[in-house]
Image (spheres, rainbow, N blue to C red):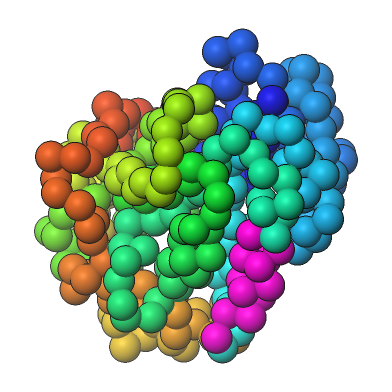
Amino acid sequence: MYVVTGITGKVGGEIARNLLKAGRAVRAVVRDLRKGAIWDDLGCDVALADMNDAAAMTSAFKSAAGVFILLPPTFDPSLGFPETRAIVAAIRQALEAARPRRVVCLSTIGAQAQRPNLLTQLAMLEQAAGDLPMPVTFLRPAWFMENCSWDVASARDAGVINSFLQPLDKAVPMVATAYIGRVAAELLQENGSGRQVVELEGPTRITPNQIAATFAELFGHPVHAEVVPRQTWEALFKSQGMKNPEPRIQMLDGFNEGWIEFEQDPASRRKGRVELKEVLGRLISEAQ
């Protein structure tokens, strides 16, 4: 049995579909049984567990050949990440008690960065799970191509995408969630030992200008990228309801300044084949 947390999201869903395609038994961990119905229909065992509930997770992880851990995203964390610290502690407790044969955790590019930022939450997960008594793989993908979903409406309706990634001609490592899911499913089924880090990016690095040009090609009308000025970010994010935008700003600075990067030698990095155009085409179809 392979256990997948975060199964209702893009990455978790891709992992589950890949495992089912391979003929593996899958247990879907959900917080709401209504959201687990689709996975029940596909033949998955469905377990109800909140990621703060160590006892419920222990029950869900019992007798598993592999467990995929997706830390619930906290985009507006409190100072010091107390929400994440509590969840990470519960995850570790559950994994120690359940003792699955192996664990794959979704981490991130730049998890090794020393400067604090929004992605520090995933560094905390790596630190907490790094010495567990079973093989643990930390999957560190690049910026998700699917983040472009926020740009579909403005590219379609106004011919513009507003970019926090800047300068507009700076290439950023990006990857499709379909590839992340495929690799994670493969890693769950591998035999290994100890702690390992696997880094993922797409076929080529991508600039905001290239994203705009790809939208233009798909929509059949001009689309251009515009910089969102750095000095406006704090007020903008607070106007959108954020109470503590600093970690998000620090993360964006990390990509723009280049200190959020991969750690390993490029030759060891896995590169997917899913191109930006394919991802944007799917996002456009989903938005219709």
Left or right, 267 with reference to 37: left
Work out whether residue 257 or residue 196 is closer to the camera in this orientation and state it: 196
Q: Position of residue 109 (x, y in %)?
A: 33, 57
Residue at 14% in and 45% down: 266
- Looking at the figure, which quarter contains the N terminus? top right
Left or right, 123 with reference to 43: left
Q: Would residue 89 be counted in the magenta stretch? A: yes
Q: Position of residue 52 (x, y in %)?
A: 75, 63
Asked if one can make out residue 4 in the rendered structure from this viewpoint, the answer is no
**Count of labels in the image:** 0
Q: State the image quarter where residue 116 is shown.
A: bottom left
Q: State the image quarter where residue 244 is shown.
A: bottom right
Seen in the picture, residue 233 relative to 71 is either above or below; the reply is below
Q: Where is residue 180 in the image (x, y as percent from the top left)?
A: 42, 37
- Numbered range of the magenta stretch: 80-92
Left or right, 214 with reference to 184: left
Residue at 44% in and 72% down: 120
Seen in the picture, residue 128 relative to 253 is either above or below; the reply is above
Asked if one can make out residue 119 in the rendered structure from this viewpoint, the answer is yes
Residue at 45% in and 79% down: 247
Q: State the image quarter where residue 5 is shown.
A: top right
Work out whether residue 40 or residue 218 is closer to the camera in this orientation and state it: 40
Q: Would residue 5 be counted in the magenta stretch? A: no
- Looking at the figure, which quarter contains the C terminus? top right
Left or right, 72 with reference to 155: right
Report the predominant secondary structure element of the magenta stretch.
Answer: helix
Seen in the picture, residue 202 relative to 80 is either above or below; the reply is above
Q: Position of residue 131 (x, y in %)?
A: 49, 58
